[in-house]
Amino acid sequence: MHWIYSAYLVLLFVLLSPGTFVTLPPHGSKIIVLFVHTALFALVWHFTMPFVKNLEYMLNPPLVAPQSKLDRVKDIYADAKSLIGL
């Protein structure tokens, strides 16, 4: 896991912990509040993770451009031809 994911996870956990900023539902039992905040955390994580992944990719681009599957197949085919002597 990259450091951006870890930092985002900790920030999201702190912000969505019951009693930090809001408790949903306001006068619910501890179990109901726990379930609501767990579901809220999961939904926010699910819908915002693509943006965090994009941010991580922009801050830490790969050193080598990813090779497409077709290019890899062509390279393997060329290597096989050279080994066989065709």
Image (cartoon, rainbow, N blue to C red):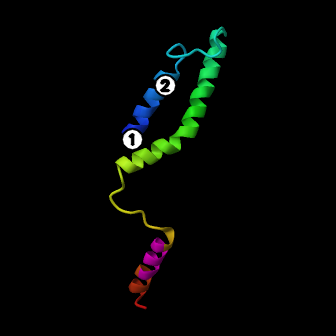
Q: On the image, numbered disc 1 is attached to which residue? A: 2
| Residue 33 location (% of width, % of height) | 63, 15
The answer to the question of whether label 2 and label 1 lie on touching residues, with beta carbons closer than 8 A, is no
Q: Which residue sits at x=36%, y=56%?
A: 62
Query: Outermost residue toward the bottom?
Result: 86
At label 1, the amino acid type is: His
Q: What stretch is highlighted in magenta?
A: 71-78
Tell me the quarter of the image containing the N terminus: top left
Q: Which residue sits at x=46%, y=73%?
A: 71
Q: In this view, does 73 lie above or below 28?
A: below
User: Quick one: SS at disc 2?
Assistant: helix
Question: In the picture provided, is 59 more to the left or to the right than 24?
Answer: left
Q: How crowded is mark 2: few (under 14 residues within 10 Å), some or many (20 or more)?
A: some
Q: How crowded is mark 1: few (under 14 residues within 10 Å), some or many (20 or more)?
A: few
Q: Quadrant of residue 30?
A: top right
| Residue 22 location (% of width, % of height) | 55, 16
Residue 19 bears which disc, if any? none
Q: On the image, numbered disc 2 is attached to which residue? A: 13
Q: Which residue sits at x=46%, y=31%?
A: 9
Question: In the picture provided, is 51 more to the left or to the right than 35?
Answer: left
**Which of the two discs, 2 and 1, sits closer to the camera?**
2
At label 2, the amino acid type is: Phe
Q: Quadrant of residue 64?
A: bottom left
Tell me the quarter of the image containing the C terminus: bottom left
User: Quick one: SS at disc 1?
Assistant: loop
Give the overall secondary structure of the magenta segment: helix
